[in-house]
Structures are given as structure tokens and as C-alpha cells.
Amino acid sequence: MTRRRKQNIKLALVCAILGAIVLMTIFAPWLAPYDPLEVNMELRLLDPCRAHPLGTDDVGRDLLARLLCGGRVSLLIGLCSNGVVGLESRDIPLVIPRTDDCIALFLGSQERYLRLFEEYNGTYWLNNGWIETAYIPSLEMKEEMREDYIRRYGEENAEFLLEQDSLWIGNYNTCGYIGSPIYRNPGHPALARQVAAINGWKYAEFEGDIRLLRMMTEGTWTDEEFCICPPRHRVEAEYTGKKIQAVPLGADAV
């Protein structure tokens, strides 16, 4: 088997896996017909079964539904900013928001994001998804990290590691919480305020806007806010304000 043939097989396998992921996220409502946010304490911590193939979490939410729903968000968020430069469309078009940061997707527009970025420079942004799934510098998280470091490296090394881990906090002066118009958890703003207090930051709260996300999913793509990369085109950086552009394969960006 030639080297080129081996490379083609590897590429085909990667494309097949990515294609399967995309299809699973598209057909998520049929593969896992449960609300990924619905809490049911009677179904908490179920083992995998026919009704719930991956089981349920500690508040009874279906894990497969949450995984597939999260895949949708990951695919969308993975396509923002210049992280997509160099992507090529072979057979289907790519639709990419013209945003500097994924935060703009939750604020409704790149324009609003830039305005707030200038007004609240040095902001550590939080929203519901980040609070529920990622590390945030809260008292609880810091204590969990301290216990983990002590167990693995000893108390003296743990304090040094915690100090090093906290150096980035000095780069921020505000904790900005972005609310959601479709999913509200009263505990999240309170936690965001706690994060601001324990790190010596100011606190600011902003109403979220799903306008861009709705446009993305409904197919109402405008050239001003989305880059549409047709088949046999490549995504390249663009420096006149639109951030990214689609150029034919084999052509140089202008």
C-alpha cells in the first residue's frame, strides 16, 4: 500500500468520524427525545438502560441528551473567530459567524460584544453553560483543587501550585455574568457574584441575546454577520472588517 493511499484512508476515517458526530448532533431530538435540562430526582444516577442508554446524572437529566445537545453547541462555538482559518469546504458549505470571540454568540452580536469589551475591559465572562460544565474560580472549586493537590503533591507543594494557578486572576478586574432569555438558574448570578467577591473583582450582569444563535440554526445568514464558504473554497483571514472570507481552493486571499 502506497504512502498516499494510507493518508487517504486516514483522512477518510477522520471525515467519517466527524460526519457521524455532526449527524448525531443534528438528529439529537430523535436519538435522545429528552429535554437535556429537565430535572427529575426520581431518575437520578440511573445506570445505562434502554430508556437512557448512557444513564442519568445526579439530578436525573438524561446524559445522552446532554451529550448530543452539548455537541451542537461545541460544533457551533468551534467555528467562531480566526480559529477556522484554513478550513476547506469540499462538498457542503460552511457557515461561520464573523465574531472575535464565542462570547459574542451569547450577547447577540459582534457589535455589542465590542462595545462591552471596550467599556468593561478586563472582564472574566461567565454564563450558564460555563458555570455548569467548566472550572470557575469559586471557593468550592478552589477548595477541591487544594485537596487534590495536597493528595497528589503534599501540602507545601499544593500551596505553591495554587499560588501559581492564581496568577492569571490579576489580568481581570470584573466578573461579567451573561444571563439567558430561555434558561434561568437563580443560583448562577449568586455564584458569579461570589467569584467576583473572592477574587477582588467588580460584578456586572448582562442580559443574554440568542439572536445570532437563532440566525445560525434557522438559516437566516447575512453576509454582514456570517461567512458562507461554498464547496471547493477555503476560509482565509480578511483584514478590512469582515474578519474571514471564502476563497476558491488554489487561490490566494486578497
Image: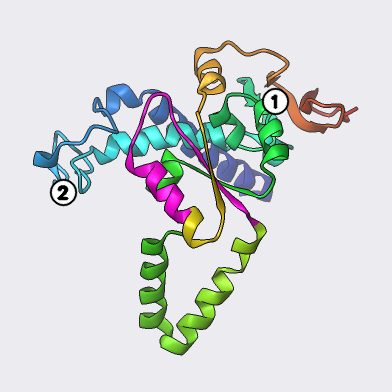
The quarter in which the C terminus is drawn is top right
Part of the protein shown in magenta: 172-195
Residue 246 visible here: yes
Residue at 63% across, 34% down: 80
Q: Amino acid at mark 1?
A: Glu
Residue 63 pos. (x, y %): 27, 41
- Specify whether 122 is left or right of 190: right
Q: Is 150 within the magenta? A: no
Q: Which mark is residue 111?
A: 1
Q: Position of residue 233 (x, y in %)?
A: 74, 24
Q: Which residue is mark 2?
A: 45
Q: Residue furthest right?
A: 254
Residue type indicated by callout 2? Leu
> Looking at the image, is 150 positioned above or below residue 117?
below
The reply to whether residue 136 is in sight is no
In x, y percent, where is residue 221? 62, 13
Q: At x 55% / y 76%, what residue is drawn?
A: 163
